[in-house]
Amino acid sequence: MSRSIIRQLDARLFEPRRWFLIDAEQNKLADVPTLERGLALIAAGNAAAVVGRLSPGVTVIDVDAGGIEGDAITENLIGWLIGRGRWHLVRPSGGGQGRNHVYCVPGADAVMLREFVQDLRISYGLPAVKIDMRGPGGSLRPLSSPHRRTGVTPAPYASGEELHAALLRLRRELPKAAPDTRTARERKAVAGRSIVALEPLPRRRSDVEPRWAAWIEARGPVPHIGGLDQSRSAIELAATTALMRAGLRADDAWRTIQSARGGAFAKARTRGRSWWTQQQWNRAVREDTAFHEAHATTPVAAGTTTSPETLAAVETARADLQRLQWLWGPRERHSVLLVAHTLLDRMTREDNLAVPCPLRNLEEDTGLARNTVLSAFAALENTLGHRLATFDHTRAESSSHVFELDSSYIEGSLSLVEPPGFTPTQPPPPGRWASLTPTSHSLWRTLPPAGQPTQPLEVLAQSAGLSHSPTSVPSARQARTLRARLAELAGAGLAEQNADGTWRRLERGNSHHERVASAAHQRIHDRIVRERTEYRSGAWNRWNRGRLQALRANRARQLAWWENLPELERGRRRRACAIAFSELPQSEQAERRHNIAAVRHRAGGRSERELHADWCRRFDHATQADRSAEWKHRFLSLSPAERGERERLLQDHRRRWHLPPTWSTSDSSVSSTPLGAVRAA
């Protein structure tokens, strides 16, 4: 790899004279005039790394999720950029597997990229710091700087020829700008003028809400806002919203902020109007507009009822989910329950036990990633019902698959005598579950509504699927999860604690949660509208082919990196991974097996059956017998419950990836072993 090309890439990707040095703890040491000077000081042992500011037009997504999840997020980003023909370059950040920097020049797709990154955060349930998007002016370590802790300079995932081609294209897309000779004050003034304040919805001018007026004038305490986020930014955003709802325009609101007393709007006054306009005023206007558009719906006509037969079947199925949830692992359980209840809600509203189930509609309703919804359908198949393949490609705009409730619930429901009457209400506010975790949804479904007997927290955790089994006492970690999810529901206005410490369910969330939910739903809805438009125009297939090519190229780079490692290093890494894998709980081992197989499958690698056969051929008869005896001993040392769980997970993995239950070799004389083809990884 040419060091010269890396330096030339850095010269385009970063501003030329805004470099500084940091130590291993990420503390700033000193400014340096050039990148070369910074690297020289690092070589002399005076600093750990050099940091620069991204050039105009350049964006970097810092993926810090780690592991297979981080690699999957990186692949999603690469596929998105390839689908839109945008320049990009990926390099490992140096912090371990699944931690990467994705450099790109998004151009006119910058806003869409930001929305896509936000969707990824929601889909994977990760905070912004784990998928951190940094735009022009953002701080980042350049390609030629070593990692601050390891001292290693990670190379981009590209060959010398690919780097040269990337440099040539970057020169075309990002011409070298003339040096900026303006002062910092002049740059700040121009930046402030370039940010346009959005127009709010028209409102009659009124007094600001008393609690906010008292805070602004230093006559009252900091008001408490809904939700768990009570940070200064969140409070100032809520205060900005209060000013907007009082009928103030951006100019009037900013004058009010400038005249605020005490600590009111301290952050906005410190950062300046451009920051406030972009981060608070425009955000408040967008959320307010989205909220009103989402709730401008026609209510369900009064008197519309669900037939007793449909209601009885749905209630029978809903009750059976308490039993079925233990068939699924703890990682997938709550996502499956969210999809299942969403389908049952739709059956109730439409008074039909077979309802359309477009993936993208369910993605909007649940906030889950599309692959997660598909996995939920696989889990629900032959348990709750059946997904009928009724989609017709010739009628793509009006056709979809259908989910039909299993007939056993229809037969079982006939034994119910006089099921209670039910009047279907409006669906929950759009995006309700997109802004909350699936675990919170499971808990909300379990909480009793007002007027019904409450449950102790231990029973609540068992009913919501938060414990190891229906009868096991929740562990300390599970108890913390329960309390955290209850607090999340309370912050959203969907749960309330009683005087005796028990909890009950509330049907409608508070206004803050509905604003957040509406904004989350709007992002998903806008993306889905774009995807459907692309699909129906024929562009989707081209994008899919490009994404598949990118996945395969990335896999090839990974394999080349592995093959270039010394054999001793590969052996050391294998042993370390095997030890770490053996210490995982059985459910996490099963999930790890499936994720690794899925990554190989998406990258177009060899099938799991072929890899399994090759693995078996590595051992002669004596070694096979020894390994079988070893695994049999480990298997018998487990408790009966653990044995059953292990066998179920292994059978599920074999069935999913079409693996044989015995040693698989070309030699038919090899007999099967007591544990078949049990493997550690």
Image (tube, rainbow, N blue to C red):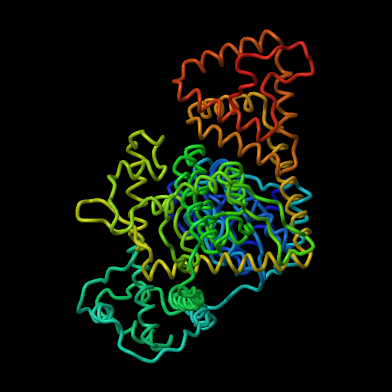
At a point 47% along the width and 38% down the height, the residue shown is 326
At a point 49% along the width and 75% down the height, the residue shown is 301
**In which quarter of the view is residue 623 placed?**
top right
Report the quarter where the N terminus lies: top right
Is residue 653 visible in the rendered structure shown here? yes
Residue 579 in percent (x, y) is at 52, 25
At a point 33% along the width and 53% down the height, the residue shown is 448
**In which quarter of the view is residue 630 placed?**
top right
Taking the image as shown, residue 245 lies to the left or right of residue 681, namely left
Residue 75 in percent (x, y) is at 65, 50
Residue 464 in percent (x, y) is at 40, 45
Taking the image as shown, residue 608 lies to the left or right of residue 332, namely right
Image: 477 above or below 74: above
Image: 460 above or below 670: below
Judge by depth and name the residue closer to the eye, 254 or 670.
670
Check the image and name the residue furthest to the bottom. Answer: 204
Judge by depth and name the residue closer to the eye, 520 or 133.
520
Check the image and name the residue furthest to the top. Answer: 622
Judge by depth and name the residue closer to the eye, 363 or 15.
363
Judge by depth and name the residue closer to the eye, 13 or 371.
371
Residue 102 in percent (x, y) is at 62, 55
How many labels, in total? 0
